[in-house]
Image (cartoon, rainbow, N blue to C red):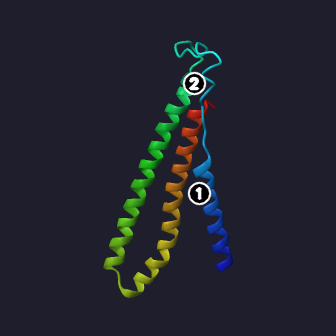
């Protein structure tokens, strides 16, 4: 178990280092032809290619974040009230039920964050 924790820690550190040094640049050579880019030309500006996708994706991800956050907070409040009002035996049962809740809440927030990052990346790359 200790070795597994060490492996997970090493993987997480590696991912953080990769994210710190990963730089995406959309800059072009300014000396090639300064008149090449014209944002008023239809289809040439990066935003014209995927505006509908980005707008609809933003709405969906915003709704998922709001609903997921609301459900998580309401569930946590209900479990907290039951924990405070319960007997000693019931408290032991609620501690067991907290583990799936925590895993679910982390998954809700992680999935919405990953989807947001993917949406931002697709908006910036013009995919």
Q: Residue at x 48, y 74 (%)?
A: 97
Q: Nearer the viewer, mark 2 or mark 1?
A: 1
Nearer to the camera, 115 or 66: 115
Q: Residue at x 57, y 14 (%)?
A: 42
Helix, strand or loop at label 2? It is helix
Left or right: residue 3 compared with residue 55: right
The reply to whether residue 1 is in sight is: no
User: Label 2: which residue?
Assistant: 46
Displayed quadrant of residue 87: bottom left
Expressed as whole percent of the image width and height from the top left, the position of residue 17 reads 61, 56
Q: Residues within 10 Å of mark 1 (few under 14, many from 20)?
A: few
Q: Residues within 10 Å of mark 2 (few under 14, many from 20)?
A: some
Residue found at the very far front of the displayed protein:
31
Quadrant where the N terminus lies?
Answer: bottom right
Q: Is residue 71 above or below residue 3?
A: above
Q: Residue at x 53, y 17 (%)?
A: 39
Upstream in the sequence, badge 2 or badge 1? 1
């Amino acid at each position: 178990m200790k070795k597994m924790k060490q492996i997970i820690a090493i993987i997480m550190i590696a991912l953080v280092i990769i994210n710190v040094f990963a730089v995406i640049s959309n800059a072009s050579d300014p000396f090639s032809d300064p008149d090449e880019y014209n944002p008023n030309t239809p289809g040439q500006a990066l935003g014209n290619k995927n505006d509908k996708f980005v707008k609809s994706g933003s709405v969906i991800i915003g709704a998922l974040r709001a609903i997921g956050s609301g459900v998580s907070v309401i569930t946590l409040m209900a479990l907290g009230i039951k924990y405070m009002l319960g007997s000693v035996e019931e408290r032991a049962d609620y501690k067991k039920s907290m583990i799936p809740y925590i895993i679910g809440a982390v998954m809700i927030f992680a999935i919405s964050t990953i989807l947001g990052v993917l949406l931002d990346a697709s908006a910036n790359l013009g995919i």
